[in-house]
Image (cartoon, rainbow, N blue to C red):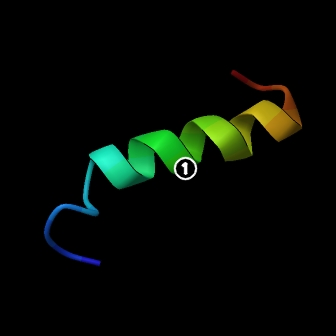
Amino acid sequence: MQGWRSRRWWDWRRQRMTRRRGSG
């Protein structure tokens, strides 16, 4: 995963995955 899926893609996906755990 290199290119535009480095910070914007991970940042948006992390917010959705972390919201399910309830850590963010």
Q: In this view, does 1 lie above or below 9?
A: below
Residue found at x 71% / y 38%: 18
Residue position for label 1: 13
* Quarter placement of the C terminus: top right
Q: x, y percentage for residue 14?
A: 56, 44
Mark 1 surroundings: few (<14), some (14-19) or many (≥20) residues within 10 A: few
The kind of residue on which mark 1 rests is Arg
Q: x, y percentage for residue 3?
A: 13, 69
Q: Is residue 2 above or below residue 10?
A: below
Q: Residue furthest right?
A: 21
Q: Which residue lies furthest to the bottom in this view?
A: 1
Q: Quadrant of residue 6?
A: bottom left
Q: Is mark 1 on a helix, strand or loop?
A: helix
Classify residue 20 as left or right of residue 14.
right
Classify residue 3 as left or right of residue 24.
left
Residue found at x 42% / y 41%: 11
Q: Quadrant of residue 4?
A: bottom left
Q: Is residue 21 above or below residue 24?
A: below
Residue found at x 85% / y 39%: 20
* Quarter placement of the N terminus: bottom left
Residue found at x 30% / y 45%: 8
